[in-house]
Image (tube, rainbow, N blue to C red):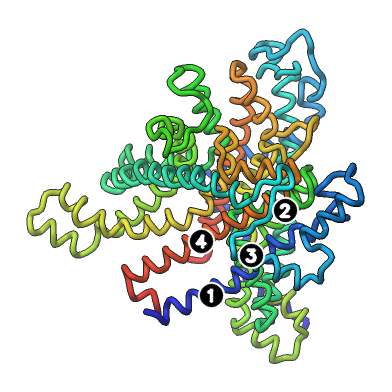
Amino acid sequence: MTAAPPSPVSRGVVRRTIGRLLQHRLACFGLAVCALVALLAIFADVIAPYDPTTSHYEAIKAPPQADFLLGTDELGRDVLSRIIYGARVSLEVTIVSIAGAVVLGSLLGMLAGYFRGWADHLIMRVMDGMMAFPMLVLALGIVAVLGPDLINAVIAITIINVPNFARMVRAQVLYVSQLDYVLAARALGAHDAKIMARYVWPGVVGNLVVYASLRASSALITESSLAFLGLGAQPPTPSWGQMLSTAMQYWDAWWMSLFPGAAIFFSVLALNFVGDGLRDALDARLND
Amino acid sequence: MLRYFALRLAQIGPVVLVVSFMVFSMTLLLPGDPTLSMLGEGATTAQRQALRTELGLDLPLPVQYGRWVGRIVTGDFGRSLRNRQPIVDMLAERIPVTLQLTILSMLVSILIGVPAGIVAAVWRNSWADIGVTFVAMFSMAIPPFWAGMLLIMLVCIQLGWLPPSGYAAFSDAPLQSLRMMILPTLTLGAAMAGLVMRQTRASMLEVMSADYVRTARAKGAREARVILHHGLPNAFIPVLTVVGLQFGTLLGGAVITESIFSLPGLGSMVIDAIFNRDFPAVQGAILVIVTGVLLLNAIIDVVYYLVDKRIAR
């Protein structure tokens, strides 16, 4: 068994998929915005004109001007700097929670789809139960138990996304498991663990990546919703959702609500574009 | 037909069991001593023991769960830890608000989404189609709380047409109640309208290329009649399904919308209860929301079956 496994995701296919993605105009726009947000988050210390928590008492609720491009908030903190640092929170929460959901969901989906039987029933009934909750309501229930803070918000967003991934992976595993090369591996007496890791898993990965990118925007919206409700990142850590909930007390300072909201909006839009683009690129691959 | 209903019920049964256990176990999962989490660090031993007895925390787990389910089924959701009010009374006050909000939002999404979808499908690839598709895409990416805030800024602060928040019960003052609901339903309905529009466009495109539409045209029916009489009724079924299945999402969105516009519904009940560590209230409200979603999904299934009996197979 030294021959390379007949993986459905070969390098050439990946390259062609990426090529197709780059031809997708909206996806390119989305990728560019995502890259911008990532750069802002990573180099926030260098890019942000001010410290996000420092108050400028001479400029409380100052409208946008040369010194403060997007104005200041009720404590005289620079809105632009807070948005830049807020990108950190949003990016971290989105990446960590989606990665967590991918890992947990794949594990459960693999177990359910590969072994079938009672493991399948048990896992999928629990997933069905979780999916009966509206996502935000399930997140609220989890945060209610764990208490409101950023880490718990990440845990909540991870958990609410697990059922989606488990279902998707299970369906994919069911399909791949009955393909000839998997049956051949089984006939040759390979271990279950080896079959799953070397033969089944590569057939799942492509769809998983697309699905993860499609779920990312919803994770971002959930994060900012929790923060907006005061159940996410706690002050003074700047986060977009929390900036908006503060802005609700100061309607005269329109810049306090306009800019953080726009940051969420464009990030979500960008993630949607990338997800759609990836899906189309993969569809085209399947149609080859 | 009875067999189909029995099958559906058998499928829902385990889900209801899992859901009820999840909601029940919320108090079990509280880190540390649940009575401390609920009453705060300042509670005396006697107070904590009283709460233990009230919640039955000393009993074995299966007995606790059985008792809890037994109480819920008879409509006893316990009492609020905050003001000792029976939770079932709180729910009774708040359910109509959330229902009014979600139902009106559904209507708004249909009233906006369906005509827009028809226009996009009939004039496919025209500027109208591209415009409508773009607006739909935007409306689905806009965070609901931001949409609500922008509406408040524009309509209430700039134009001064409506008060930014408040609520009037429909039974007390119907007109005032509807007026106060305009912005919340627009906020919640707009996101859904995008989805409704996309579905309407897709199913209209499919229906309009069907044989019976061609026949109607061949018989010389006017285009408006072909669209509204032959196309729309058939395209509408999948749209209704999408609307129904989104009820859960809508209830999730209602949480946010209620908190922006200070509406006293189930969503704001959950949020308030979380901040007050009022767990029986959190459990009650969440249980009602999930039950609502499950019920509606079951109803949609049945309606769908009545419309198209091939589904049963």
Q: Name the residue under label 4.
A: A283
Q: In this view, does A168 lie above or below A199?
A: above
Judging from the image, mark 1 belongs to the subunit labelled B
**CB of mark 4 within 8 Å of CB of mark 3?**
no
Three-letter code, disc 3: Val
Evaluate whether label 3 is on the same chain as label 2. no
Three-letter code, disc 1: Gln
Three-letter code, disc 4: Asp
Q: Mark 3 points at which residue?
A: B19
Percent across and percent down for residue B57 are 81, 62
Extreme residue in the left direction: B220
Q: Mark 2 points at which residue?
A: A142
Q: Give the foreground label among 4 and 3.
A: 3
> Can I make out residue B2 in this image?
yes
- Secondary structure at badge 3 equals helix
Q: Name the residue under label 1.
A: B11
Q: Give the foreground label among 3 and 2.
A: 3
Separation (CA) of disc 3 from disc 2: 13 Å
Percent across and percent down for residue A92 are 75, 44
Query: In front here: A259 or B236?
Result: B236
Three-letter code, disc 2: Ile
Q: Is residue B166 above or below residue A189?
A: above
- Secondary structure at badge 1 equals helix
